[in-house]
Image (cartoon, grey):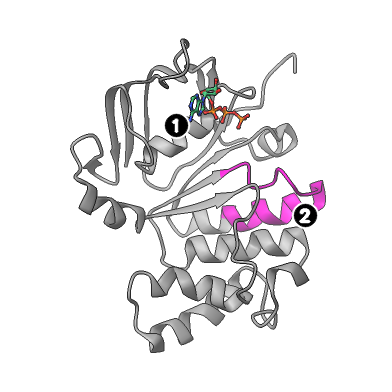
Amino acid sequence: MIELQHVTKLYPASSRPALDDVSTEIDKGEFVFLIGSSGSGKSTLLRLLLKEDDPTRGTVVVNGKTLNTMSKWQVPKLRRTIGCVFQDFRLLRNRTVAQNVAFALEVINKPQRTIKRVVPEVLEMVGLEGKGNRLPGELSGGEQQRVAIARAFVNRPLVLLADEPTGNLDPETSEGIMLLLERINRTGTTVVMATHDYHIVDSMRRRVIELNGGALTRDQSRGVYGVGR
Ligand SMILES: Nc1ncnc2c1ncn2[C@@H]1O[C@H](COP(=O)(O)OP(=O)(O)OP(=O)(O)O)[C@@H](O)[C@H]1O
């Protein structure tokens, strides 16, 4: 499903690798927390999985495709199989909630009749029924993140990558978002979530992969955030 083999990433401006000989495998349907202090390489790893950047050395495989040898024209097809959620929601401010979600289907040329059917379904799933005509600015942070999750999931991706999805939310709202991500995971979608939120990691007891200065220093099933934090 996801495989990294001896992946090193060196940014031109930096003397220290952002990722340092990282090898791991994530199976279909897993839920994985990616943890590590600021600058440890979490976002870099997620960017490599999306082929937003290429590794300096090593091999990255996502959904059966080796990204190193993938040509540019195949990248949009890869990204259709991956949903993304970010800390800052990244919604289109001047489009309604429903339009934000519909947009994800329009760009992959789904017919309007499918869009009309699927968008209300997914908005209901994330608990936003009746709010499709609001603008993002008229929603709470938690609701905006639900829109972002709906947009990421509407195309039923094989993998959902979440980079600090609860970073801007209070603990109670974060819990709701985590329940939603768990629900998505139960549909068979692999979830990889970068986080600093030790409450969430400790309460969910899922697989934990820890990066430290770019190196993978811990891989623990049913893990915790860590001792001595
Ligand atoms: N575009 C870039 N050019 C140069 N260096 C970069 C670039 N992006 C990241 N880095 C460096 O790579 C290292 C890893 O950064 P990365 O953003 O992956 O860490 P992170 O674990 O996601 O951190 P945070 O938790 O703060 O988001 C850092 O030292 C960072 O300064």
Vertical order, 169 against 20 (above or below):
below
Which label sits on residue 61? none
Q: Looking at the image, in which quadrant does ligand 1 appear?
A: top right
Relative side of 218 to 73, left or right: right
The quarter of the picture where the C terminus appears is top right
> Does label 1 point to a residue whose CB lies under 8 Å from ligand 1?
yes
Give the quadrant of the N terminus.
top left
Q: Secondary structure under badge 2?
A: helix
Give the x, y percent position of residue 36.
60, 23
Please rate how many residues cluster around mark 1, counting C-alpha atoms within 10 Å: few if below 14, some from 14 to 19, many from 20: many
> What is the x, y in percent for residue 29?
42, 48
Residue range highlighted in magenta: 163-182
Give the number of marks: 2
| SS at badge 1 | helix
Q: Earlier in the sequence, mark 2 or mark 1?
A: 1
Q: Is residue 136 above or below residue 49?
A: below
- Give percent across and percent down for residue 167: 71, 43
Q: Are marks 2 and 1 in contact (CB under 8 Å)?
A: no
Pinpoint residue 223: horizontal percent, then vertical percent. Answer: 59, 28
Q: Nearer the viewer, mark 2 or mark 1?
A: 1
Residue in the image at 71% along x and 16% along y: 227
* Separation of residues labelled 2 and 1 (CA atoms): 26 Å
| Residue 209 is one of the magenta-drawn residues | no
Q: Which mark is residue 173?
A: 2
Residue at (59% x, 71% y) in the render? 125
Q: Nearer the viewer, residue 77 or 180?
A: 77
The kind of residue tagged 2 is Thr
Q: Which residue is mark 1?
A: 45
Residue at point 25% right, 39% down?
67
Which residue occupies 64% across, 47% down?
A: 87
Relative placement, left or right, of 122 versus 133 is left
